Image (cartoon, grey):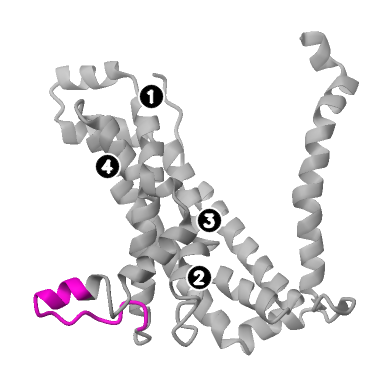
């Protein structure tokens, strides 16, 4: 084994297939999209280089882009905060129970493995003003709001509804990741803290929280990046309506590219989305410091 590790030709041979696949699937498409974002391109005619005009139009003449950017940032902040809090709370609670742990784990994780498209249609039916939840409220004499049709407010009601549905669907993923990290902590540390007279609250603060920091970075990155490129629920529940008020970056990209065939313009939106994901990941990795502990 040591001879192979010293053999540079062997290293190249083993790494070459993975490097070629990585380059063809990821690097080449990104370079191609960057080029298209600088072109006027509709797939029917050859790309025409126009420089930064697509980006200028995005931030100066496109009102829907501003709405989509605002909604994506709101969705990222809401998802990151809510999923971290509730996911960690559920993970701690389920880790400390013995009976019914697997049952509750499956209940909370089940929505994660279901189709987002199917769930979007299901919840759109539930929030339809003429059926679903409003019909249940009508039995008690309560007039339900237009859950997916209200367009007023800085963040309209439909965006809050979609955000809570997304929390319900993906909470189990964050919970499972935290449970995996917590169960990996040695029980001897907890036993020693209890012998020294530490309460459960102090044990959680001084033992559990520091030791799950690596998973905190992972889950926070997954939450932020996933929410920035979120598409399925938004498109299936509102399709960006009413009046473009629930568009996010992914739905705006899809509409420009596949509805209006503005592939150059859609490519510019995708680059903005890529840059935002990279910036968020960099901020998370730089702001959260992870200490090494001997266990």
Labelled pair 1, 4 in contact (Cβ < 8 Å): no
Rendered residue at 56%/72% (across/down): 251
For the residues labelled 3 and 1, the Cα–Cα distance comes to 26 Å
Residue depth check, mark 1 versus mark 4: number of the one nearer the observer: 4
Residue depth check, mark 4 versus mark 2: number of the one nearer the observer: 2
> Dot 2 corresponds to which residue?
235
Assess disc 3: are there few (<14), some (14-19) or many (≥20) residues with their C-alpha within 10 Å of its C-alpha: many
* Mark 1, secondary structure of its residue: loop
- Give the mark nearest the N terminus, 1 or 4: 4
> Dot 3 corresponds to which residue?
225
Rendered residue at 83%/23% (across/down): 11
Residue depth check, mark 2 versus mark 1: number of the one nearer the observer: 2
- Give the mark nearest the N terminus, 4 or 2: 4
Q: Which residues are magenta?
A: 135-149
> Dot 1 corresponds to which residue?
184
- The spot of residue 295 in percent (x, y) is 39, 19
């Amino acid at each position: 084994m040591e001879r192979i590790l010293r053999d540079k030709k062997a290293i190249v041979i083993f790494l070459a297939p993975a490097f070629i696949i990585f380059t063809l699937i990821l690097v080449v498409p990104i370079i191609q999209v960057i080029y298209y974002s600088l072109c006027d391109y509709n797939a029917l005619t050859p790309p025409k280089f126009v420089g930064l005009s697509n980006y200028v139009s995005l931030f100066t003449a496109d009102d829907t882009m501003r709405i989509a950017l605002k909604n994506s940032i709101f969705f990222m902040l809401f998802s990151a905060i809510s999923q971290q809090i509730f996911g960690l709370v559920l993970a701690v609670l389920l880790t400390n129970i013995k009976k019914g742990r697997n049952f509750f784990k499956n209940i909370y994780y089940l929505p994660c493995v279901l189709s987002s498209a199917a769930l979007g249609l299901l919840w759109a039916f539930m929030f339809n003003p003429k059926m679903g939840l409003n019909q249940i409220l009508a039995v008690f004499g309560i007039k339900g709001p237009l859950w997916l049709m209200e367009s007023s407010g800085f963040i309209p009601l439909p965006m809050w509804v979609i955000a809570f549905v997304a929390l319900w669907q993906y909470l189990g993923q964050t919970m499972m990741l935290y449970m995996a990290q917590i169960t990996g902590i040695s029980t001897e540390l907890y036993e020693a803290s209890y012998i020294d007279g530490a309460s459960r609250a102090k044990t959680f603060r001084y033992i559990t929280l520091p030791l799950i920091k690596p998973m905190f970075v992972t889950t926070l990155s997954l939450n932020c990046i996933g929410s920035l490129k979120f598409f399925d629920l938004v498109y299936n529940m509102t399709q960006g309506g009413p009046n473009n008020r629930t568009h996010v970056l992914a739905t705006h990209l899809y509409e420009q590219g596949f509805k209006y065939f503005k592939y150059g313009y859609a490519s510019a939106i995708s680059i903005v989305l890529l840059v935002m994901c990279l910036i968020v990941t960099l901020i998370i990795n730089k702001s959260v410091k992870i200490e090494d502990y001997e266990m």
